[in-house]
Image (spheres, rainbow, N blue to C red):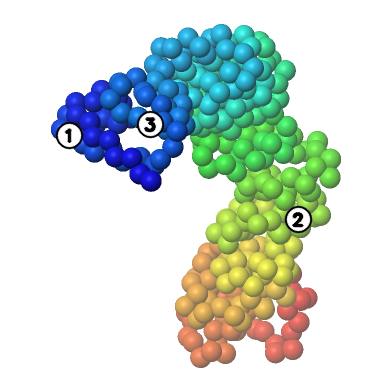
């Protein structure tokens, strides 16, 4: 059964339209209650839902200052930023409630700054962490809180692209300062969840076990690996590990960079040269940064392909066919 009610010039917000023209309201049959305007009837559940929205912003802000327990939990779910600001001043606010407010999408920077300095939550690690992870937290506030954040949580912050670049760079710097005195177990665990810059700091520590975990990290891309190989600060042990890595040693661009690197083992260089394109071999041969011990093997490969290469007068190569490349270092 359906109830049809006709009304005109209604002042009831749930039923009113954009104009005062005659409208026809159709609602499902349910126990009806007369609402405030007195011109139509709504189900009890609809009236209760509407009465919640009848409270003005001023009334909600006033209630936010004095509410307790369950009532306060309902208030902090209010999306209006002014209501959340008033709720933050409530003396009944708990740590869990403060964390919930900070995680909200409508909370203002002023409210975040106030909660960060609230003496009630001075020792709350959870609140400090969510404040650092919220992109709307003022920069000065986050920088002052980073010294309290644990190592692995900082690594997660450094990977979060939603966080300001200055904060991520500061986190990377703080972690790099801790790497030299960090236990081996922490380095290994950190390598599994760190971003590229932190991985570089770990690989520069010189520990081959840590470097091996870093090379297996899902955070590393081919472009980043290319940069690592070309960095002057990258140690010889790391280059040797990349040369023999089952994944990175198969990448064409990585092989190109390894051929140019002075620390790449010569037997790997010779193997990589055979898989290079002729145009790239010519570019490598003319590259002044290529190791002098590598050029003869590039020259021989080009000659075997029937390519002509201009040789300077001071460059004379005599490579016997039976020479062992592994012996040339």
Residue 254 on image: x %, y %: 60, 66
Per the image, the residue denoted by label 2 is 213
Q: How dense is the environment of label 2, judged by Cα within 10 Å: few (below 14), some, or many (20 and up)?
A: some
Per the image, the residue denoted by label 1 is 22
Query: In the rendered structure, are the residues bearing label 2 and label 3 in contact, judged by CB atoms less than 8 Å apart?
Result: no
Quick check: 322 above or below 247? Answer: below
Quick check: 239 above or below 108? Answer: below
**Residue 42: assigned label:** 3
Q: Quadrant of residue 20?
A: top left
Residue 94 on image: x %, y %: 66, 18
Q: Residue drawn 15% across and 33% down?
A: 21
Q: Residue drawn 19% across and 29% down?
A: 8
Q: Nearer the viewer, mark 2 or mark 3?
A: 3
Instruction: For marks 2 and 1, give the CA distance.
Output: 73 Å
Tell me which numbered mark, 3 or 1, is placed earlier along the sequence: 1
Q: Nearer the viewer, mark 2 or mark 1?
A: 1
Quick check: 69 above or below 265? Answer: above
Instruction: For marks 3 and 1, give the CA distance.
Output: 18 Å
* SS under mark 1: loop
Q: Is residue 265 visible?
A: no
Which of these two is toward me, 119 or 300?
Answer: 119
- Compared across the picture, whether 175 is left or right of 20 comes to right
Q: Residue drawn 52% across and 13% down?
A: 64
* SS under mark 3: strand
Q: Quadrant of residue 224?
A: bottom right
Instruction: For marks 2 and 3, give the CA distance.
Output: 65 Å
């Amino acid at each position: 059964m359906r109830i049809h009610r006709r009304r005109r010039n209604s002042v009831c917000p749930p039923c009113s339209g954009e104009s005062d023209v005659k409208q026809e309201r159709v609602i499902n049959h349910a126990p009806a209650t007369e609402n405030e305007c007195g011109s139509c009837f709504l189900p009890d559940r609809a009236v209760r839902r509407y009465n919640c929205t009848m409270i003005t912003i001023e009334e909600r802000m006033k209630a936010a200052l004095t509410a307790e327990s369950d009532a306060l939990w309902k208030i902090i779910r209010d999306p209006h930023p002014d209501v959340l600001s008033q709720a933050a001043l409530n003396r009944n606010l708990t740590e869990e409630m403060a964390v919930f407010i900070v995680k909200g999408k409508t909370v203002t920077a002023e409210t975040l700054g106030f909660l960060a300095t609230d003496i009630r939550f001075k020792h709350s690690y959870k609140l400090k962490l969510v404040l650092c992870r919220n992109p709307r937290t003022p920069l000065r506030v986050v920088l002052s809180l980073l010294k309290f954040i644990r190592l692995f949580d900082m690594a997660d912050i450094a990977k979060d692209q939603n966080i300001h670049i200055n904060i991520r760079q500061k986190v990377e710097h703080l972690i790099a300062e801790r790497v030299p005195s960090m236990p081996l177990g922490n380095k290994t665990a950190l390598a599994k969840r760190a971003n590229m810059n932190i991985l570089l700091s770990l690989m520069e520590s010189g520990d081959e076990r840590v470097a091996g975990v870093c090379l297996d990290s899902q955070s590393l891309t081919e472009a980043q690996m290319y940069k690592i190989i070309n960095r002057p600060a990258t140690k010889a042990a790391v280059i040797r590990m990349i040369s023999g890595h089952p994944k990175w040693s198969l990448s064409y661009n990585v092989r190109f960079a390894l051929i140019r690197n002075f620390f790449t083992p010569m037997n790997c260089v010779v193997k990589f040269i055979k898989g290079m394109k002729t145009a790239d071999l010519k570019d490598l041969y003319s590259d002044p940064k290529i190791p002098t011990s590598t050029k003869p093997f590039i020259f021989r490969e080009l000659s075997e392909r029937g390519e002509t290469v201009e040789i300077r007068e001071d460059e004379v190569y005599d490579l016997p066919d039976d020479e062992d490349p592994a012996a040339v270092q």
